[in-house]
Amino acid sequence: MLGCYVTGIFPRPKELIETTRAYDRRRVGKEALEKAFKEATVKVIEAQTSAGLSYVSDGMLKWQDLLRPFTENLGGVKIGALARWFNNNTFYRKPIVLGEILRKKDITVEIANMDCLPRNVPWKAVLPAPYTLAKLSENNFYKSETELLLKYAEILKEEIRSLAERNFKYVQLSDPALVYNPFKEPISKDILADVNNALETAVKGVTVRVCLQTFFGDFTQILPEALDFPVDDFGIDLYETSLEKLEEYTFDKSVALGLIDARSSLLEDEKELSAVAKELIESVYPSKTCDVFICPNCDLEFLPWERAKEKIRIIAKVAKNLENELS
Amino acid sequence: MDKPFPTQEIGSLAKPAWRVKGYRGESLSEEEIAETVKWGRKFGIENLEELVKILTAKERTPADKKALLQWSAKFAIRFFEAAGLDVVFDGEQWRSEMYEHVIRNVEGFEFLGYVKSFDYRYFNKAACVNRPRYTKSFYVEEFTFTRENAKKMVKVPFTGPYTLVDWTFNEYYERKAGGKIKDFKKRKTAARRDFLCDLIKEVVRPEISRLTEAGAKWIQIDEPAATTNPSAEEMELFVEAFNETVRGFNCTFSLHNCYSNYRILAKYASQLRNCSQLALEFANRDSRQAGIDERVGYKELKFFEDYGFHGKYGLGVVDVHTDFIEPPELIRDRIIHALSIVKDSSRIYVSTDCGLRTRTWETSFAKLKNMVFGAELARKDLS
């Protein structure tokens, strides 16, 4: 199968930006804000279905950052100060862990706009991976980082289950912290073993397809250990990963190729992307080809909405080109 | 400066309602006009009736709008001087905002729309779509006006090229590099360097040249994005950009950076050439308790010393993100504590953490007055 989808928080369309700003300045009320979110959600879903993506997401327009629904809703966690979101001019609020972490309700499904999602295309949800949640939290309670990591993994397991019950077919675990490594320090085998355990806890027995989406760093740093992680697919940021090194490996799992640059407004050349993807696929799957997904390298939220919409079309076109070429 | 602990601001001051509405051509309420006159009188500004005439007119001509820029610049200069600062500017009253002001005045850029900064805050982000072209000066007129109207020493805040590049989509150079370099990461890195080099050569240095010709003696390069990408390659690129920006000019240069990773910046600060001062934010990291022995917010100052930075410090002693008015004694304690690290009183300029644009004029004025008092208390401690 050659599929395509997007990989995280969408940019807010202009009208929604205006309403959120007005809300912030107390010029409109909660009702107007909710209405604007709903209208924008319909819009971002429509952009995905009309482009022909294989899975559709609700766009996560309410997510202030990848961790926020958890930071705000988990017992034992307090919302902290603003911190830089990796090497972006964007900020998130740090989760401060002060006590035993408790999941008091379904977090993700509660803010998902499921009634806007289409009936005829499978749904995709995005969650922070356990490692990224733990790494970006300030731990003032658990004895070790490993303990915190496993605790988050248990919480995520419940989240994934509740998503599966609501008919989501695909769950992406976003794990930028695992590969973001500006000082090029080797990633220890112990950490990778802990991540493996945490993923095992989070996804064991779940009925949805699960992808570990890495971005803002080179995927090959966590190879070959990551190939044993108990997930179905690996997401790779091709704007941070050395293509040369990637081609040294062969895979027996599916990949989501982050071929479209969500941190650049330049519209990519579809033919060039198709050629790069084809070469990669032939290299990492020398005999048996697994499923391949075409996607952006990270959340589209770094782009203004209009430009993101054009990139969604490119994603679909590249997937189509490849399907024709590889069949 | 002949006295220890001279006081300075960092750049921006909030634009008063009459400047914003007046410039947009909107009408002002009687209270707003009265507020304008109140501040004007407080600063001893002459011919206020001319300003009131512009603000109460039914329509505003382009000449009126230009006059409003000058009026608000004059108010801001007097504001800083009345607070007692030794180094002043015009509170960036001529600029829409530090990023937009430059980008809108240089050819080769297009604003694409708003992107998220955090929560419900956004910023208008531009793309470089063509080789940047310098067609007109964007700071000189403001500087000339400020110099003519200021009684104190003038320092020109200048948005640095590294930050301009970091905050802008790089379409032109990425397109140009396309095809030539296969690896996407290497392609983007090369395109970023080309963009930065061209921007410095084509825009930043020509503007500095015009400023120095017009008599600018001190330019502060503002680089809030300096440590956004903390890798060695990026930090070296930032240092190279600063050094190339200031190379060969007969002018004093300083660097302002705030809300950043100082462990990283400290490591590279001694490589900055011709950088007479680092203006850094510390008050935001500090406690409000009195005392000169332990000051949590200033521990990172030591990194700069340990890594061998020998220049001066613009020591942030006033937090610009809170309405808390720092008492003069707290300001003094912060200065005396910093002196115990830096050892040399001539290396400390007393400053706000960053520009005061997010505070009201009342709050900003009270904060600055106390900062000036605190510096005076610290001077007394020395003698």
Image: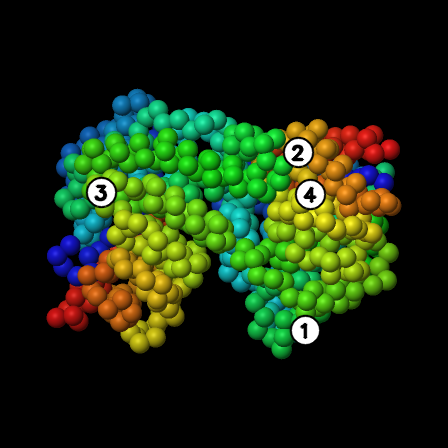
**Chain at numbered mark 2:** A
Q: Give the secondary structure at mark 1.
A: helix
Q: Which mark is residue B251?
A: 3
User: Regarding mark 2 in the picture, which secondary structure is present there?
Assistant: helix
Quadrant including the N terminus of chain A: top right
Q: Are marks 3 and 2 on the same chain?
A: no
Q: Is residue A257 left or right of residue B338?
A: right
The residues tagged by marks 4 and 3 sit, at their Cα atoms, a distance apart of 47 Å
Q: How many residues crowd mark 2 within 10 Å: few (<14), some (14–19), many (20+)?
A: many
Choose between A161 and B310: the one closer to the eye. Answer: B310
User: Label 2: which residue?
Assistant: A311
Q: Which of the image's four quarters has the C terminus of chain A?
A: top right
Q: How far is disc 3 from disc 2 in space, using C-alphas?
A: 46 Å
Depth order, front residue of A256/B60: A256
Mark 4 and mark 2 lie on one chain; the one further toward the N terminus is 4
Can you give x and y, in whole percent of width and height, for residue B132 in the image?
A: 42, 29
Q: Amino acid at mark 2?
A: Lys
